[in-house]
Image (cartoon, rainbow, N blue to C red):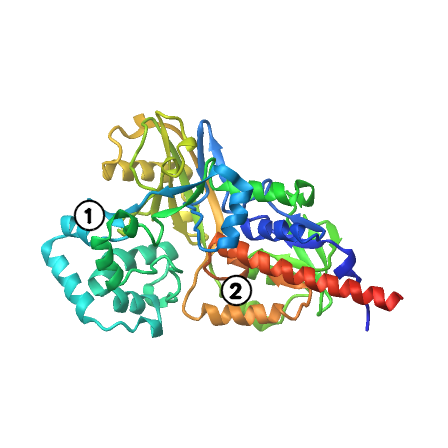
Amino acid sequence: MSTNTDVTDAPLTVLGGGPAGLATGFYARRRGLDVRLFEAADAVGGNARTLQLGPFRYDTGAHRFHDKNDAVTADVKALLGDDLRRVDAPSQICWRGTRIDFPLAPYDLLRKLPLSLLAQIAWEQLSIPRVSADADHFREMARQSYGPTLANLFLLNYTEKLWGADADRLSPHVAGDRLEGLDLQTFFLEAFGGETTKTRHLDGSFYYPRHGYGQIAEATADAMGREHIRTGARVTKLTHDGRRLRRVLINEDEPVPVGTTVSTLPLTLVLRLLDPPPPDDIQALARSMRFRHLRLVVLGLDRPRLTPNASLYFPDRSVPFTRLYEPKNRSPDMAPNDQTVVVLEQPCHPESEAWTQSNEALRDTAVDLLTGQRLIDDGDDEIVAATHHTLPFAYPILEVGSEAKAERLTTYLDHFENLHLLGRSAQFTYTHVHNLYAQARALTAQIASQSSSMAAGVTQTES
Protein backbone atom coordinates (compact mmCIF):
# COMPACT_ATOMS: atom_id res chain seq x y z
CA MET A 1 0.00 0.00 0.00
CA SER A 2 1.40 3.40 -0.98
CA THR A 3 2.01 6.04 1.67
CA ASN A 4 -0.35 9.07 1.42
CA THR A 5 2.39 11.61 2.01
CA ASP A 6 0.11 14.45 0.92
CA VAL A 7 -1.90 14.05 4.15
CA THR A 8 1.07 14.99 6.28
CA ASP A 9 3.24 17.08 3.96
CA ALA A 10 1.00 19.17 1.70
CA PRO A 11 -1.11 22.06 2.96
CA LEU A 12 -4.83 21.62 3.31
CA THR A 13 -6.22 23.18 0.12
CA VAL A 14 -9.43 25.20 0.37
CA LEU A 15 -11.28 26.18 -2.80
CA GLY A 16 -13.36 29.33 -2.40
CA GLY A 17 -13.09 32.27 -0.01
CA GLY A 18 -16.70 32.72 1.05
CA PRO A 19 -17.90 32.07 4.61
CA ALA A 20 -17.51 28.28 4.33
CA GLY A 21 -13.97 28.45 2.92
CA LEU A 22 -12.81 31.09 5.38
CA ALA A 23 -14.28 29.19 8.32
CA THR A 24 -12.47 26.06 7.15
CA GLY A 25 -9.18 27.92 6.94
CA PHE A 26 -9.70 29.59 10.30
CA TYR A 27 -10.50 26.40 12.19
CA ALA A 28 -7.78 24.47 10.36
CA ARG A 29 -5.16 27.00 11.44
CA ARG A 30 -6.50 26.78 14.99
CA ARG A 31 -5.90 23.02 14.77
CA GLY A 32 -2.32 23.67 13.69
CA LEU A 33 -2.80 22.61 10.07
CA ASP A 34 -0.99 24.25 7.20
CA VAL A 35 -3.57 25.79 4.86
CA ARG A 36 -3.78 27.54 1.51
CA LEU A 37 -6.98 29.05 0.16
CA PHE A 38 -7.71 29.95 -3.47
CA GLU A 39 -10.37 32.58 -4.21
CA ALA A 40 -11.29 33.68 -7.74
CA ALA A 41 -12.40 37.20 -6.79
CA ASP A 42 -10.07 39.99 -5.74
CA ALA A 43 -11.44 39.93 -2.18
CA VAL A 44 -12.72 37.34 0.28
CA GLY A 45 -16.27 37.03 1.54
CA GLY A 46 -18.08 35.53 -1.44
CA ASN A 47 -21.70 36.67 -1.37
CA ALA A 48 -21.34 37.87 2.22
CA ARG A 49 -19.16 40.93 1.61
CA THR A 50 -19.55 44.55 2.68
CA LEU A 51 -18.82 47.12 -0.02
CA GLN A 52 -18.54 50.90 -0.02
CA LEU A 53 -20.14 53.58 -2.20
CA GLY A 54 -18.80 56.96 -1.18
CA PRO A 55 -19.78 57.39 2.50
CA PHE A 56 -22.18 54.42 2.36
CA ARG A 57 -21.51 50.81 3.38
CA TYR A 58 -23.78 47.98 2.26
CA ASP A 59 -23.79 44.20 2.16
CA THR A 60 -24.16 41.90 -0.82
CA GLY A 61 -27.28 40.45 0.76
CA ALA A 62 -29.58 41.11 3.71
CA HIS A 63 -27.39 39.02 6.00
CA ARG A 64 -27.83 38.44 9.72
CA PHE A 65 -25.82 36.41 12.19
CA HIS A 66 -28.09 34.21 14.31
CA ASP A 67 -27.18 33.05 17.81
CA LYS A 68 -28.01 29.38 17.20
CA ASN A 69 -24.72 27.67 18.07
CA ASP A 70 -23.04 28.66 21.35
CA ALA A 71 -19.53 27.63 20.32
CA VAL A 72 -19.70 29.42 16.96
CA THR A 73 -21.24 32.54 18.50
CA ALA A 74 -18.39 32.60 21.04
CA ASP A 75 -15.84 32.27 18.23
CA VAL A 76 -17.35 35.11 16.19
CA LYS A 77 -17.65 37.30 19.28
CA ALA A 78 -13.96 36.66 19.98
CA LEU A 79 -13.11 37.69 16.41
CA LEU A 80 -15.13 40.93 16.44
CA GLY A 81 -15.24 41.91 20.11
CA ASP A 82 -17.55 44.86 20.81
CA ASP A 83 -18.11 45.35 17.08
CA LEU A 84 -20.59 42.45 17.10
CA ARG A 85 -23.85 43.92 18.35
CA ARG A 86 -27.31 42.59 19.13
CA VAL A 87 -29.93 44.13 16.83
CA ASP A 88 -33.72 44.13 17.18
CA ALA A 89 -35.10 45.30 13.83
CA PRO A 90 -38.20 43.43 12.64
CA SER A 91 -39.08 43.42 8.97
CA GLN A 92 -42.32 44.19 7.15
CA ILE A 93 -44.25 42.87 4.17
CA CYS A 94 -45.49 45.46 1.66
CA TRP A 95 -48.99 44.30 0.80
CA ARG A 96 -51.63 46.30 -1.09
CA GLY A 97 -50.31 49.64 0.11
CA THR A 98 -50.05 48.41 3.70
CA ARG A 99 -47.00 47.24 5.65
CA ILE A 100 -47.55 44.07 7.64
CA ASP A 101 -45.13 43.20 10.46
CA PHE A 102 -42.99 40.15 9.80
CA PRO A 103 -42.83 37.94 11.84
CA LEU A 104 -46.63 38.03 11.59
CA ALA A 105 -48.43 39.15 14.73
CA PRO A 106 -52.19 38.93 15.38
CA TYR A 107 -52.53 42.43 16.86
CA ASP A 108 -50.88 43.89 13.76
CA LEU A 109 -53.08 41.87 11.40
CA LEU A 110 -56.19 42.93 13.33
CA ARG A 111 -55.36 46.55 12.57
CA LYS A 112 -54.43 46.09 8.93
CA LEU A 113 -56.41 43.25 7.35
CA PRO A 114 -60.10 43.34 6.40
CA LEU A 115 -62.39 41.57 8.86
CA SER A 116 -63.46 39.04 6.23
CA LEU A 117 -59.84 37.96 5.68
CA LEU A 118 -59.18 37.74 9.41
CA ALA A 119 -62.22 35.54 9.90
CA GLN A 120 -61.12 33.24 7.10
CA ILE A 121 -57.56 33.00 8.49
CA ALA A 122 -58.83 32.27 12.01
CA TRP A 123 -61.21 29.56 10.78
CA GLU A 124 -58.45 27.89 8.75
CA GLN A 125 -56.00 28.01 11.64
CA LEU A 126 -58.49 26.27 13.90
CA SER A 127 -59.96 23.76 11.47
CA ILE A 128 -57.28 22.59 9.05
CA PRO A 129 -55.31 19.50 10.20
CA ARG A 130 -51.54 19.96 10.40
CA VAL A 131 -49.91 17.26 8.26
CA SER A 132 -47.19 19.33 6.57
CA ALA A 133 -44.35 17.04 7.73
CA ASP A 134 -45.23 14.69 4.86
CA ALA A 135 -45.89 17.39 2.24
CA ASP A 136 -44.68 16.62 -1.27
CA HIS A 137 -43.91 20.24 -2.19
CA PHE A 138 -43.84 23.76 -0.76
CA ARG A 139 -47.38 24.72 -1.82
CA GLU A 140 -48.81 21.76 0.06
CA MET A 141 -46.65 22.44 3.11
CA ALA A 142 -47.56 26.15 3.23
CA ARG A 143 -51.30 25.61 2.80
CA GLN A 144 -51.44 22.77 5.30
CA SER A 145 -49.31 24.62 7.87
CA TYR A 146 -50.84 28.10 7.72
CA GLY A 147 -54.09 27.69 5.81
CA PRO A 148 -54.75 28.59 2.17
CA THR A 149 -55.53 32.26 2.84
CA LEU A 150 -52.43 33.10 4.89
CA ALA A 151 -50.23 31.03 2.56
CA ASN A 152 -51.59 32.70 -0.57
CA LEU A 153 -51.32 36.20 0.88
CA PHE A 154 -47.80 36.16 2.25
CA LEU A 155 -45.89 32.97 1.40
CA LEU A 156 -46.57 31.44 -2.00
CA ASN A 157 -46.22 34.45 -4.31
CA TYR A 158 -43.07 35.62 -2.56
CA THR A 159 -41.50 32.16 -2.58
CA GLU A 160 -42.21 31.68 -6.29
CA LYS A 161 -40.64 35.07 -7.06
CA LEU A 162 -37.61 34.29 -4.93
CA TRP A 163 -36.89 30.89 -6.47
CA GLY A 164 -38.27 31.41 -9.96
CA ALA A 165 -40.36 28.23 -9.91
CA ASP A 166 -43.93 27.22 -9.15
CA ALA A 167 -44.53 26.37 -5.50
CA ASP A 168 -45.62 22.84 -6.38
CA ARG A 169 -42.20 22.27 -7.99
CA LEU A 170 -40.29 23.51 -4.94
CA SER A 171 -39.11 21.35 -2.07
CA PRO A 172 -40.93 21.83 1.26
CA HIS A 173 -37.51 22.75 2.68
CA VAL A 174 -36.88 25.87 0.56
CA ALA A 175 -37.67 28.15 3.50
CA GLY A 176 -35.07 26.52 5.75
CA ASP A 177 -35.98 27.56 9.29
CA ARG A 178 -37.26 31.01 8.30
CA LEU A 179 -40.84 29.91 8.98
CA GLU A 180 -39.96 27.99 12.11
CA GLY A 181 -42.46 28.72 14.82
CA LEU A 182 -45.09 30.23 12.53
CA ASP A 183 -47.90 27.99 13.75
CA LEU A 184 -51.12 28.45 15.69
CA GLN A 185 -49.51 28.21 19.14
CA THR A 186 -46.81 30.76 18.34
CA PHE A 187 -49.33 32.95 16.55
CA PHE A 188 -51.41 33.43 19.71
CA LEU A 189 -48.45 33.48 22.11
CA GLU A 190 -47.10 36.45 20.22
CA ALA A 191 -50.44 38.22 20.46
CA PHE A 192 -49.97 38.54 24.23
CA GLY A 193 -46.26 37.99 24.78
CA GLY A 194 -45.04 41.49 24.01
CA GLU A 195 -42.35 42.66 21.63
CA THR A 196 -39.61 40.41 23.03
CA THR A 197 -41.65 37.29 22.35
CA LYS A 198 -42.62 38.58 18.92
CA THR A 199 -39.05 38.87 17.72
CA ARG A 200 -37.61 35.73 19.25
CA HIS A 201 -37.79 33.72 16.01
CA LEU A 202 -37.25 34.30 12.31
CA ASP A 203 -35.20 37.40 11.56
CA GLY A 204 -36.37 40.06 14.02
CA SER A 205 -33.50 39.69 16.49
CA PHE A 206 -29.94 38.90 15.45
CA TYR A 207 -26.28 39.88 15.67
CA TYR A 208 -24.70 42.29 13.22
CA PRO A 209 -21.15 43.74 12.98
CA ARG A 210 -20.61 47.45 13.40
CA HIS A 211 -19.05 47.94 9.93
CA GLY A 212 -21.21 45.50 7.98
CA TYR A 213 -21.67 41.78 7.67
CA GLY A 214 -18.48 41.42 5.65
CA GLN A 215 -16.56 42.30 8.80
CA ILE A 216 -17.08 38.67 9.87
CA ALA A 217 -15.33 37.43 6.72
CA GLU A 218 -12.53 39.97 7.05
CA ALA A 219 -11.91 39.14 10.71
CA THR A 220 -11.94 35.42 9.93
CA ALA A 221 -9.42 35.95 7.12
CA ASP A 222 -7.18 37.97 9.45
CA ALA A 223 -7.31 35.24 12.09
CA MET A 224 -6.59 32.58 9.48
CA GLY A 225 -3.62 34.62 8.22
CA ARG A 226 -3.72 36.59 4.98
CA GLU A 227 -0.49 34.93 3.88
CA HIS A 228 -2.46 31.70 3.50
CA ILE A 229 -5.02 33.30 1.16
CA ARG A 230 -4.57 33.90 -2.53
CA THR A 231 -7.18 36.01 -4.31
CA GLY A 232 -7.50 36.36 -8.07
CA ALA A 233 -6.97 32.59 -8.26
CA ARG A 234 -9.78 30.99 -10.26
CA VAL A 235 -9.91 27.20 -10.26
CA THR A 236 -10.25 26.05 -13.88
CA LYS A 237 -9.60 22.30 -13.68
CA LEU A 238 -9.49 19.51 -11.11
CA THR A 239 -7.24 16.66 -12.21
CA HIS A 240 -7.70 13.26 -10.59
CA ASP A 241 -6.70 9.61 -10.94
CA GLY A 242 -10.15 8.19 -10.21
CA ARG A 243 -9.42 7.86 -6.52
CA ARG A 244 -7.84 11.14 -5.44
CA LEU A 245 -7.57 14.71 -6.63
CA ARG A 246 -3.99 15.26 -7.76
CA ARG A 247 -3.84 18.85 -9.05
CA VAL A 248 -5.92 21.98 -9.33
CA LEU A 249 -5.32 24.27 -12.28
CA ILE A 250 -5.33 27.95 -11.35
CA ASN A 251 -6.24 30.58 -13.95
CA GLU A 252 -5.94 28.00 -16.75
CA ASP A 253 -2.15 27.84 -16.71
CA GLU A 254 -0.85 27.07 -13.20
CA PRO A 255 -1.06 23.45 -12.00
CA VAL A 256 -0.87 23.05 -8.22
CA PRO A 257 -0.46 19.60 -6.60
CA VAL A 258 -2.99 19.00 -3.83
CA GLY A 259 -3.56 16.65 -0.95
CA THR A 260 -6.59 16.96 1.30
CA THR A 261 -8.95 19.43 -0.35
CA VAL A 262 -12.10 21.20 0.84
CA SER A 263 -14.23 22.61 -1.97
CA THR A 264 -16.85 25.28 -1.35
CA LEU A 265 -17.38 25.81 -5.09
CA PRO A 266 -20.85 25.15 -6.54
CA LEU A 267 -21.49 21.41 -6.73
CA THR A 268 -22.24 21.48 -10.44
CA LEU A 269 -19.09 23.51 -11.15
CA VAL A 270 -16.88 20.95 -9.39
CA LEU A 271 -18.29 18.22 -11.61
CA ARG A 272 -17.68 20.31 -14.75
CA LEU A 273 -14.06 20.95 -13.73
CA LEU A 274 -13.12 17.31 -13.21
CA ASP A 275 -10.47 15.94 -15.55
CA PRO A 276 -11.12 13.23 -16.65
CA PRO A 277 -14.83 14.19 -16.70
CA PRO A 278 -17.51 12.20 -14.84
CA PRO A 279 -19.67 9.59 -16.60
CA ASP A 280 -22.32 10.94 -18.98
CA ASP A 281 -25.21 10.25 -16.60
CA ILE A 282 -23.51 12.21 -13.81
CA GLN A 283 -22.86 15.13 -16.17
CA ALA A 284 -26.49 15.11 -17.32
CA LEU A 285 -27.70 15.08 -13.73
CA ALA A 286 -25.44 18.00 -12.85
CA ARG A 287 -26.78 20.01 -15.79
CA SER A 288 -30.31 19.56 -14.45
CA MET A 289 -29.43 21.29 -11.16
CA ARG A 290 -30.14 25.02 -11.16
CA PHE A 291 -28.90 28.03 -9.22
CA ARG A 292 -30.62 31.37 -8.74
CA HIS A 293 -28.71 34.54 -9.60
CA LEU A 294 -29.21 37.97 -8.00
CA ARG A 295 -28.99 41.55 -9.22
CA LEU A 296 -28.62 44.31 -6.67
CA VAL A 297 -29.51 47.99 -7.01
CA VAL A 298 -27.82 50.21 -4.41
CA LEU A 299 -29.18 53.72 -3.78
CA GLY A 300 -27.72 56.36 -1.45
CA LEU A 301 -30.51 58.65 -0.25
CA ASP A 302 -30.41 62.19 1.07
CA ARG A 303 -32.50 61.49 4.17
CA PRO A 304 -31.62 60.11 7.61
CA ARG A 305 -33.82 56.99 7.32
CA LEU A 306 -36.16 55.38 4.83
CA THR A 307 -37.94 53.01 7.25
CA PRO A 308 -37.31 51.62 10.76
CA ASN A 309 -37.11 48.08 9.38
CA ALA A 310 -34.22 45.76 8.64
CA SER A 311 -35.96 44.59 5.45
CA LEU A 312 -39.10 45.13 3.41
CA TYR A 313 -40.53 42.20 1.46
CA PHE A 314 -42.55 42.48 -1.76
CA PRO A 315 -44.74 39.43 -2.43
CA ASP A 316 -46.68 41.12 -5.27
CA ARG A 317 -45.78 39.58 -8.63
CA SER A 318 -45.98 42.97 -10.33
CA VAL A 319 -42.91 44.10 -8.32
CA PRO A 320 -39.68 42.67 -9.82
CA PHE A 321 -37.78 42.99 -6.54
CA THR A 322 -38.26 40.56 -3.67
CA ARG A 323 -36.68 42.54 -0.88
CA LEU A 324 -35.29 45.92 0.15
CA TYR A 325 -32.88 46.21 3.06
CA GLU A 326 -31.54 49.30 4.79
CA PRO A 327 -28.09 48.65 6.32
CA LYS A 328 -28.30 51.66 8.63
CA ASN A 329 -31.07 49.90 10.56
CA ARG A 330 -28.59 47.14 11.33
CA SER A 331 -25.75 49.49 12.28
CA PRO A 332 -25.79 53.31 12.36
CA ASP A 333 -22.19 53.29 11.12
CA MET A 334 -23.28 52.13 7.65
CA ALA A 335 -24.21 55.66 6.51
CA PRO A 336 -23.79 59.31 7.57
CA ASN A 337 -26.18 60.66 10.20
CA ASP A 338 -28.20 62.68 7.69
CA GLN A 339 -28.24 60.08 4.89
CA THR A 340 -29.06 56.43 4.36
CA VAL A 341 -28.50 53.66 1.82
CA VAL A 342 -30.86 50.94 0.57
CA VAL A 343 -30.30 47.79 -1.47
CA LEU A 344 -32.97 46.12 -3.61
CA GLU A 345 -32.66 42.46 -4.68
CA GLN A 346 -33.94 41.05 -7.94
CA PRO A 347 -33.60 37.26 -8.32
CA CYS A 348 -33.01 36.10 -11.89
CA HIS A 349 -32.47 33.06 -14.02
CA PRO A 350 -29.33 33.28 -16.21
CA GLU A 351 -29.98 34.59 -19.72
CA SER A 352 -33.44 35.83 -18.72
CA GLU A 353 -34.59 39.35 -19.55
CA ALA A 354 -34.20 40.33 -15.91
CA TRP A 355 -30.58 39.15 -15.93
CA THR A 356 -29.69 40.95 -19.17
CA GLN A 357 -31.63 44.16 -18.51
CA SER A 358 -29.47 47.30 -18.49
CA ASN A 359 -28.35 48.79 -15.19
CA GLU A 360 -30.07 52.06 -16.07
CA ALA A 361 -33.42 50.36 -16.65
CA LEU A 362 -33.11 48.40 -13.42
CA ARG A 363 -32.27 51.57 -11.50
CA ASP A 364 -35.30 53.36 -12.95
CA THR A 365 -37.50 50.43 -11.89
CA ALA A 366 -36.12 50.67 -8.36
CA VAL A 367 -36.81 54.40 -8.16
CA ASP A 368 -40.33 53.88 -9.49
CA LEU A 369 -40.92 51.25 -6.78
CA LEU A 370 -39.75 53.55 -3.98
CA THR A 371 -41.97 56.31 -5.30
CA GLY A 372 -44.95 54.03 -5.84
CA GLN A 373 -44.64 52.63 -2.31
CA ARG A 374 -44.54 56.22 -0.98
CA LEU A 375 -41.10 55.59 0.48
CA ILE A 376 -39.61 58.65 -1.24
CA ASP A 377 -41.32 61.75 -2.62
CA ASP A 378 -38.92 63.38 -5.03
CA GLY A 379 -37.64 60.43 -7.07
CA ASP A 380 -34.19 61.10 -8.47
CA ASP A 381 -33.83 64.31 -6.45
CA GLU A 382 -33.28 62.31 -3.27
CA ILE A 383 -30.72 59.92 -4.78
CA VAL A 384 -27.13 61.03 -4.20
CA ALA A 385 -25.35 57.81 -5.24
CA ALA A 386 -26.16 54.61 -7.10
CA THR A 387 -24.46 51.40 -8.20
CA HIS A 388 -25.28 47.84 -9.25
CA HIS A 389 -23.97 44.33 -8.65
CA THR A 390 -24.57 40.87 -10.04
CA LEU A 391 -24.28 37.79 -7.85
CA PRO A 392 -24.18 34.59 -9.90
CA PHE A 393 -24.82 31.28 -8.11
CA ALA A 394 -26.42 33.19 -5.22
CA TYR A 395 -28.24 30.10 -3.94
CA PRO A 396 -29.30 26.68 -5.21
CA ILE A 397 -32.88 26.20 -6.36
CA LEU A 398 -34.30 23.48 -4.14
CA GLU A 399 -36.83 21.87 -6.45
CA VAL A 400 -38.71 18.68 -5.71
CA GLY A 401 -36.24 15.86 -6.28
CA SER A 402 -33.15 18.08 -5.98
CA GLU A 403 -32.17 16.51 -2.65
CA ALA A 404 -32.01 13.06 -4.23
CA LYS A 405 -30.07 14.44 -7.19
CA ALA A 406 -27.61 16.24 -4.92
CA GLU A 407 -27.15 13.08 -2.87
CA ARG A 408 -26.32 11.10 -6.00
CA LEU A 409 -23.79 13.73 -7.15
CA THR A 410 -22.13 13.99 -3.75
CA THR A 411 -22.01 10.20 -3.52
CA TYR A 412 -20.08 10.17 -6.79
CA LEU A 413 -17.66 12.79 -5.45
CA ASP A 414 -17.25 10.80 -2.24
CA HIS A 415 -15.18 8.37 -4.30
CA PHE A 416 -12.37 10.94 -4.15
CA GLU A 417 -10.99 10.14 -0.73
CA ASN A 418 -9.16 13.45 -0.29
CA LEU A 419 -12.09 15.71 -1.33
CA HIS A 420 -14.58 17.25 1.10
CA LEU A 421 -17.55 19.48 0.21
CA LEU A 422 -18.71 22.32 2.43
CA GLY A 423 -21.08 25.23 1.91
CA ARG A 424 -24.50 26.14 0.61
CA SER A 425 -23.60 25.84 -3.07
CA ALA A 426 -21.19 22.94 -2.62
CA GLN A 427 -23.71 20.81 -0.76
CA PHE A 428 -26.70 22.19 -2.67
CA THR A 429 -28.66 22.95 0.47
CA TYR A 430 -30.21 25.83 2.37
CA THR A 431 -28.11 26.82 5.36
CA HIS A 432 -26.83 29.77 7.39
CA VAL A 433 -23.40 31.11 8.28
CA HIS A 434 -23.53 29.83 11.85
CA ASN A 435 -24.19 26.34 10.45
CA LEU A 436 -21.28 26.68 8.01
CA TYR A 437 -18.90 27.63 10.82
CA ALA A 438 -20.12 24.70 12.91
CA GLN A 439 -19.60 22.30 9.99
CA ALA A 440 -16.14 23.73 9.29
CA ARG A 441 -15.25 23.33 12.95
CA ALA A 442 -16.25 19.65 12.88
CA LEU A 443 -14.64 18.95 9.51
CA THR A 444 -11.27 20.43 10.42
CA ALA A 445 -11.26 18.48 13.68
CA GLN A 446 -11.76 15.32 11.62
CA ILE A 447 -9.02 16.27 9.14
CA ALA A 448 -6.60 17.14 11.95
CA SER A 449 -7.28 13.80 13.63
CA GLN A 450 -6.67 11.92 10.39
CA SER A 451 -3.51 13.90 9.76
CA SER A 452 -2.18 13.08 13.25
CA SER A 453 -3.00 9.40 12.81
CA MET A 454 -1.28 9.27 9.43
CA ALA A 455 1.77 11.09 10.73
CA ALA A 456 2.01 8.62 13.61
CA GLY A 457 1.70 5.73 11.16
CA VAL A 458 4.46 7.13 8.94
CA THR A 459 6.73 7.58 11.97
CA GLN A 460 6.18 4.01 13.11
CA THR A 461 6.87 2.71 9.58
CA GLU A 462 10.12 4.65 9.35
CA SER A 463 11.30 3.44 12.76
Q: Visible in this render: residue 152? A: no
Residue at (56% x, 69% y) in the render = 409
Q: Is residue 302 left or right of residue 31?
A: left
Image quadrant occupied by the N terminus: bottom right
Q: Which mark is residue 325?
A: none
Q: Is residue 330 above or below residue 458?
A: above
What label does residue 96 carry, if any?
1
Q: How many marks?
A: 2
In the displayed orientation, state which residue is furthest to the right.
463
Against 3, is 78 above or below? above
Residue at position x 26%, y 28% from top? 378
Task: Tell me the CA gap for discs 2 and 1.
Answer: 39 Å
**Three-letter code, disc 1:** Arg
Tag nearer the camera, 2 or 1: 1
| Residue in the foreground of this view, choosing between 413 and 441 | 441
Q: Where residue 236 appears, x then y in whole percent?
A: 65, 53
Residue 287: assigned label: 2
Residue type, numbered disc 2: Arg
